[in-house]
Amino acid sequence: MSTAVIIVAAGRGTRAGGAEPKQWQPLAGRPVLAHTIDAFAGIGRVVLVLHPEDMARGAALFGGQVTLCAGGEDRSASVRNALELLAGSGVTRVLIHDGARPLVSRAVIDGVLRALETGPAAAPALPVSDALWTGADGAVSGMRDRAGLWRAQTPQGFDFEAILAAHRAHPDGAADDVEVARAAGLSVAITQGTEDNLKITYPEDFLRAERLLRTTMDIRVGHGYDVHAFEPGDHVILCGVKVPHSARLKGHSDADVGMHALTDAIYGALAEGDIGRHFPPSDPQWKGAASEIFLDHAVKLAEARGFRISNCDVTLICERPKIGPHALEMAQELARIMGLDPARISVKATTSERLGFTGREEGIAAIATATLIAE
């Protein structure tokens, strides 16, 4: 099944206070929307629905990461615009999420996706546990039975064609997409929500979200592996350092096997594929390029996603050249490129005891690990 995600953020709500709409206000140093988009990394294509006046801002901040869509006069119209944009694209199921819910967990998302394997619609919710009153003129005017009542959350998930047809048949506004689905006769399964999946509505919600972000540690570990063969030459470039040798490494770029492995480790921690995805070897502009370009891109991508690089470890595997005399300089060069303290970067080497292609001195291999921590 092909999954798409619609993040609805076209509103202009004022209850949250501040000089701009809540989805653009800072949360732990980044816009609320940046956290929301990150929550769906790797799920599928993301369509971000914005107020028409915010489209340029969205392109500047999230261009290449999401597909932008202009919102409509109300929430239902905004969702309908996004669904129409996805029509005919091969999407089979869709998650529709509030842009102001930046702390949705992968467990909540996965619960909705699992429910869609056996039904046309599902949404997370929490049972109402507090007593319910009605009120008038600042006083309690009555009671309501809480039995069978649920607090709705998002993402709300649907069979794509079913919810598209439901929205087309429901031109009037709705509180959420479950209301639209039920009006079309769809059965909606309730999945497990969480208290942390709050919707930022009032100023105090920012404080609560900040506290939750500080107590939820997101640590990512990525691994990279690369190999380059030798060809005639008089030096190799390893971790940004020119090392004299009786051959050079063969590659489309400068063939810096150590830096390539480290770059892939960072991309891996971000679930962003490898160097080939971002810098295709079929593109002639990267022929002979310095691998510093690739590593710098990976580091900046991590920063843009709200991560800092805690430490890196690179192991070069070869019989020759000898790495030890250059290891400290290599670590310092990587630290310069990445903007890190050299104490956070390890460069070391080992041999393969004359076994395999590295033992036969046909090339060099490298293994790297990078640890990223969300800020």
Image (spheres, rainbow, N blue to C red):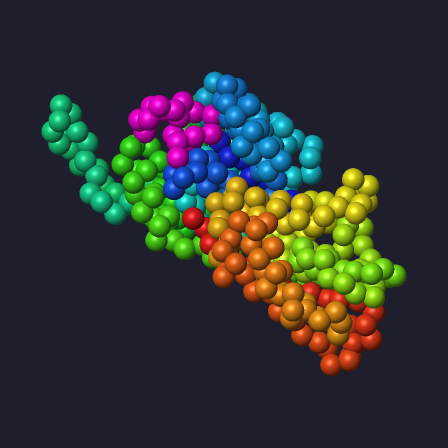
**In the displayed image of the protein, which residue is found farthest to the bottom?**
353
**In the displayed image of the protein, which residue is found farthest to the left?**
139
Magenta: main secondary structure? loop
On the image, the x and y values in percent for residue 360 come to 82, 75
Residue drawn at (46%, 41%) of the image: 35
On the image, the x and y values in percent for residue 161 come to 62, 35
Residue 22, magenta (yes or no)? yes
Q: As displayed, is residue 101 above or below residue 335?
A: above
Residue drawn at (22%, 45%) of the image: 130
On the image, the x and y values in percent for residue 343 come to 49, 61
- Looking at the picture, tell me which residue is in the foreground, 61 or 160: 61
On the image, the x and y values in percent for residue 337 come to 59, 49
Q: How many numbered discs, if any?
A: 0
Residue drawn at (57%, 51%) of the image: 336
Q: Quadrant of residue 354?
A: bottom right
Q: As displayed, is residue 250 above or below residue 358?
A: above
Q: As displayed, is residue 172 above or below residue 319?
A: above
Residue 144, magenta (yes or no)? no
Which region shows up in magenta?
9-26
Position of 374 compared to 296: left or right? left
Position of 240 compared to 37: left or right? right
Q: Quadrant of residue 90?
A: top right
Residue drawn at (68%, 69%) of the image: 323
- Looking at the picture, tell me which residue is in the foreground, 48 or 125: 48
Q: As displayed, is residue 199 above or below residue 328?
A: above
- Looking at the picture, tell me which residue is in the foreground, 56 or 244: 244
Residue 369 is at least partly visible in this image: no
**In the displayed image of the protein, which residue is found farthest to the right?**
232
Residue 337 is at least partly visible in this image: yes
- Looking at the picture, tell me which residue is in the foreground, 26 or 188: 26
